[in-house]
Image: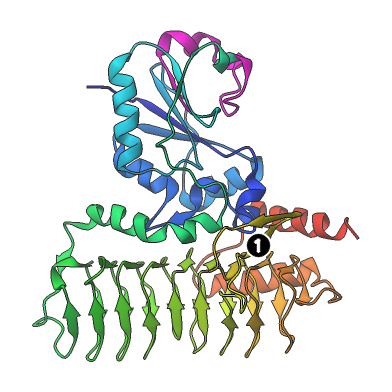
């Protein structure tokens, strides 16, 4: 049996590929399926010590928000995982297979000639720890080790790929909820379920009469203290996080993940809500990613299909990327708000702390701190944006930290220094 004492999770080389989520968060915090990426690793290795190395402020913010204390790596073996690697059964089987062949030898696992995982035996790194940049798997130190190419390891190269693969991730993660209660019509009278054995319910879940749960094509997981209000329909595979509310008449289609403390209504398809975001009213959201502390006003809609049925491109900072799919909607950064009747075109990205309220379709890229959402819109003053963020977070008994404020200020200057 291979013993993994230490695990180090690092960020990808280009964090802009996960914009706008990566403005406020390290990549390993991305919610994909039912869990965040780092949580999947913790579940798989509950006895291992897990450490994190990434951009300084985002990593510090992560430590503060999740109550993680800095510890010292123990004098033992170390597994390093690039956080763009998808943590699933295939990954764990591949790592185990590689290590079983030569457990006492340090090595690097690559995909397409890019090192993405490293296994360091105690003898090969502990004495030289102060000289090693562990977060750079391309450094000369790692080039000294055996390199094994593995094409079967799945990775997320861009944020939008999490949307496209979210159904697979929900199904993979559903194994972690086998101890949850199964749906029982006697406990939830007046509700209807298809394939009820594929429905998993946490403690304190409330499901009101006339709700329909359709798990015929994939699991439905509803975490603790979530509330599903009357006339809502959920289609699996989908995940509803703890303390979230699905509003009256909501239509939650397959491949959808809603993190904790969200309020969601209207029509949602193949989308991911990170956490603490609201879409309480009618309106369509499809093939989209919503970061934290976002509020989508009533009848906010997005298009996720061009009339020409052509592939959709997304702008990640300054790079225009072909998603190689005809379905793609909105990537929305933290603390962004929309007015009633806001409309987003296919393949739109919006940075953090924007206020979008124009009646016309805004452009496909909306800068951070935009006051209006159009190309010529003025900038939302950073002091006002921080003040609003404080008010919003305090309503959920959360506080905006000095570290998060610094990240917001840095993003504000990055946007305005380009003018």
**Residue 341: in magenta span:** no
In-front residue for pair 187/288: 288
Q: Work out whether residue 264 can be spotted.
A: no
Q: Check the picture and name the quadrant holding the N terminus.
A: top left
Magenta region, residue range: 117-140
From the top left corner, tell me how far across and down residue 299 is, in percent. Answer: 56, 89
Question: Can you say whether 205 is above or below 233 in the image?
Answer: above
Q: Residue at x 48, y 84 (%)?
A: 280
Residue 219: % across, % down? 25, 65
| Vertical comparison of 293 with 234: above or below | above
Q: Position of residue 77 (x, y in %)?
A: 39, 19
Q: Is 281 or 143 nearer to us in this picture?
A: 143
Residue hosting label 1: 313
Label 1 environment density (alpha carbons within 10 Å; few <14, some 14–19, many ≥20):
some
Q: Residue at x 24, y 79 (%)?
A: 213
Q: Is residue 19 above or below residue 212?
A: above
Residue 206 placement, left or right of 280: left
The residue at the point 25 percent across, 74 percent down is: 205
User: How many labels were placed on the picture?
Assistant: 1
Please, what secondary structure does the residue beneath circle 1 have? strand
In the picture provided, is 244 more to the left or to the right than 282? left
Whether residue 122 appears in magenta in the rendering, the answer is: yes
Where, quadrant-wise, is the C terminus in this rendering?
A: bottom right
């Amino acid at each position: 049996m291979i013993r993994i004492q230490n695990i180090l999770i690092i960020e990808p080389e280009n964090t802009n590929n996960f914009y706008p989520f990566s403005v406020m968060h390290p990549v390993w915090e991305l919610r994909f399926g039912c869990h965040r990426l780092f949580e999947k690793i913790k579940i798989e290795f509950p006895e291992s010590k897990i450490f994190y190395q990434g951009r300084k402020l985002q990593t510090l913010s992560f430590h503060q928000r999740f109550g993680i204390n800095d510890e010292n790596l123990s004098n033992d073996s170390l597994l390093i995982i690039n956080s763009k690697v998808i943590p699933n059964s295939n990954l764990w089987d591949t790592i185990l297979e590689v290590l079983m062949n030569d457990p006492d030898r340090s090595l690097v696992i690559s995909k397409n000639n890019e090192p993405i995982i490293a296994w360091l035996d105690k003898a090969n790194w502990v004495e030289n720890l102060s000289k090693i940049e562990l977060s750079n798997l391309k450094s000369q130190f790692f080039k000294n080790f055996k390199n094994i190419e593995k094409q079967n390891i799945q990775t997320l190269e861009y944020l939008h790929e999490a949307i496209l693969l979210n159904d697979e991730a929900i199904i993979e993660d559903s194994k972690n909820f086998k101890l949850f209660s199964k749906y029982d019509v006697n406990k939830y009278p007046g509700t209807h379920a298809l394939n009820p054995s594929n429905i998993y319910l946490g403690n304190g879940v409330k499901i009101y009469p006339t709700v329909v749960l359709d798990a015929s094509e994939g699991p439905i997981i509803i975490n603790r203290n979530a509330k599903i209000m009357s006339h809502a329909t959920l289609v699996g595979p989908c995940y509803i996080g703890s303390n979230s509310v699905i509003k009256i008449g909501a239509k939650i289609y397959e491949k959808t993940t809603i993190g904790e403390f969200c309020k969601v209504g209207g029509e949602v398809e193949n989308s991911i809500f990170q956490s603490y975001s609201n879409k309480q009213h009618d309106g369509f959201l499809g093939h989209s990613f919503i970061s934290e502390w976002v509020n989508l006003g009533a009848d906010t809609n997005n298009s996720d299909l061009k009339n020409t049925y052509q592939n959709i491109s997304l702008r990640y900072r300054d790079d225009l990327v072909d998603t190689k799919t005809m379905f793609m909607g909105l990537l929305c950064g933290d603390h962004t708000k929309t007015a009633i009747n806001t409309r987003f075109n296919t393949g739109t990205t919006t940075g953090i702390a924007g206020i979008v309220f124009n009646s016309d379709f805004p452009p496909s890229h909306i800068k951070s701190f935009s006051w209006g959402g159009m190309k010529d819109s003025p900038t939302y003053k950073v002091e006002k944006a921080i003040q609003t963020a404080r008010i919003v977070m305090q309503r959920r008994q959360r506080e905006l930290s000095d570290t998060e404020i610094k990240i917001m200020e840095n993003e504000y200057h990055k946007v305005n220094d380009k003018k």
